[in-house]
Image: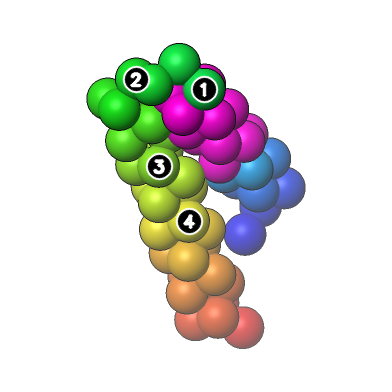
Amino acid sequence: MGLDDKIENAGEKLGGSAKEATGKATGDERLEAEGKGDQIKADVKQAGEKIKDAFKH
């Protein structure tokens, strides 16, 4: 996994955490769910990159 990808995935996950926390604090269930979705998407991307790296070696 390239450093750029790691940084992008970490940023996406952090952004998702912020959305989720804001949604919880304001009672906005849609924003909370969107934040959770962003975190899951970042995790899936990271897992995919790790699989690609495993096959490269």
Q: CA distance from mark 1 to mark 4?
A: 24 Å
Q: Which kind of residue does numbered mark 2 sit on? A: Asp
Residue 44 is situated, as x and y percent measured from the top left of the image, at 40, 58
Q: Residue furthest left?
A: 30
Q: In this figure, which residue is indicated by the disc labeled 2?
A: 28
**Picture coordinates of residue 10 (x, y %)?**
64, 43
Residue 35 pos. (x, y %): 42, 33
Q: Are marks 2 and 4 in contact (CB under 8 Å)?
A: no
Of circles 2 and 4, the one toward us is: 2
Question: What amino acid is found at the position of numbered circle 1 in the picture?
Answer: Ala
Say which label, 3 or 1, has the lower sequence index. Answer: 1
Q: Answer whether residue 55 is magenta in the image.
A: no
Which of the numbered marks, if any, corresponds to residue 25? Answer: 1
Q: Is residue 34 visible?
A: no
Between disc 1 and disc 4, whose residue precedes? 1
Q: Pick whichever of labels 4 and 3 is earlier in the sequence.
A: 3
Dot 4 amino acid type: Asp
Question: What's drawn in magenta, residue-wise?
Answer: 11-24
Residue 43 - label: 4
Q: Residue at x 48, y 66 (%)?
A: 47
Asked if residue 47 can be seen in this view, the reply is yes
Q: Is residue 26 above or below residue 11?
A: above
Q: Secondary structure at mark 4?
A: helix
- Separation (CA) of disc 3 from disc 2: 13 Å
Q: Residue at x 54, y 70 (%)?
A: 50
Quarter of the image containing the N terminus? bottom right
Front residue of 23 and 52: 23
Quadrant containing the C terminus in the rendered view: bottom right
Task: Please name whichever residue, 30 or 43, is drawn nearer the observer in this view of the structure.
Answer: 30
**Callouts 2 and 1 close, C-beta under 8 Å:** no
**Residue 15 in which image quadrant:** top right
Residue under pointer 3: 36
